[in-house]
């Protein structure tokens, strides 16, 4: 890694050294030609000519020679274009300070009034928000009470439904018992009727036997 770094540094140093030496070995006549070409391009309406444009203006040449000359040329142009601003007169400075002081006071007063108005509006908004919050809380309390009452009603309904189901179950059981008892009653009724019939027949037979015994006794 360090070997790569020193190799790159060596290459860059070599390039800068070549450019530096090219500036040293360029004759003044060549430098003047390059700068004259740049001035001509600027005069023609190109405020910042490139190295390629300068070479085209010269009709050829090496960019390695044109580039350092144009770098120095651009640096001198920037230095010439820097405008010096004169100091402000003391009377004007004092007058501006007075005006700025007045403007500052007016701005401060306006800001203070604006802050006061905004503060009052904020208090009104806060009061309104608190009122709306209280109303919302009351509404929530009412809804909770209604929900509780609804829950109680639902519980009572479920209890009554449970009792109704229980009563229906008991009624169904009673109905089944009544059906069974009705069947038993019919069976007992048939048995009683049969017993009555047998009893009637037995009485008739007894009477016949008694009559027969009486007849036999008389005959003896």
Image (cartoon, rainbow, N blue to C red):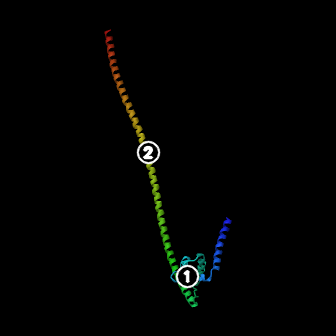
The residue closer to the viewer here, 141 or 29, is 29
**Residue 133: percent from left, percent from top:** 48, 65
Q: Residue at x 48, y 68 (%)?
A: 129
Disc 1: which residue: 37
Q: Residue at x 62, y 81 (%)?
A: 27
Give the mark toward the camera: 2 or 1: 1
Q: Quadrant of residue 11?
A: bottom right
The residue closer to the viewer here, 80 or 186, is 80
Left or right relative to 196: residue 60: right
**Residue 97: percent from left, percent from top:** 56, 86
**Residue 94: percent from left, percent from top:** 57, 89
Q: Secondary structure at mark 2?
A: helix
The residue closer to the viewer here, 123 or 151, is 123
Vertical order, 201 against 76 (above or below): above
Check whether the beta carbons of the residues at disc 2 and disc 1 lie within 8 A of each other: no
Quadrant of the image containing the C terminus: top left
Q: Quadrant of residue 188?
A: top left
Q: Residue at x 47, y 57 (%)?
A: 145
Quadrant of the image containing the N terminus: bottom right
Disc 2: which residue: 163
């Amino acid at each position: 890694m360090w070997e790569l770094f020193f190799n790159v540094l060596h290459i860059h140093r070599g390039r800068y050294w070549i450019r530096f030496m090219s500036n040293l070995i360029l004759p003044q006549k060549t430098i003047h030609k390059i700068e004259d070409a740049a001035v001509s391009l600027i005069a023609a309406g190109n405020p910042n000519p490139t190295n390629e444009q300068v070479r085209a203006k010269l009709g050829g040449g090496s960019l390695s020679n044109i580039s350092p000359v144009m770098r120095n040329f651009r640096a001198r142009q920037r230095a010439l274009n820097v405008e010096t601003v004169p100091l402000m007169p003391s009377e004007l400075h004092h007058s501006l300070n007075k005006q700025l002081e007045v403007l500052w006071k007016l701005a401060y007063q306006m800001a203070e009034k604006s802050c006061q108005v905004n503060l009052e509006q904020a208090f009104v908004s806060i009061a309104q928000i608190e009122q709306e919050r209280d109303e919302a809380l009351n509404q929530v309390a009412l809804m909770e009470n209604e929900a509780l009452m609804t829950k109680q009603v639902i519980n009572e309904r479920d209890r009554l439904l449970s009792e109704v189901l229980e009563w229906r179950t008991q009624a169904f059981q009673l109905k089944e018992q009544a059906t069974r008892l009705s069947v038993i009653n019919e069976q007992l009724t048939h048995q009683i009727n049969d017993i009555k019939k047998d009893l009637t027949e037995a009485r008739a037979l007894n009477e016949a036997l008694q009559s027969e015994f009486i007849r036999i006794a008389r005959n003896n």
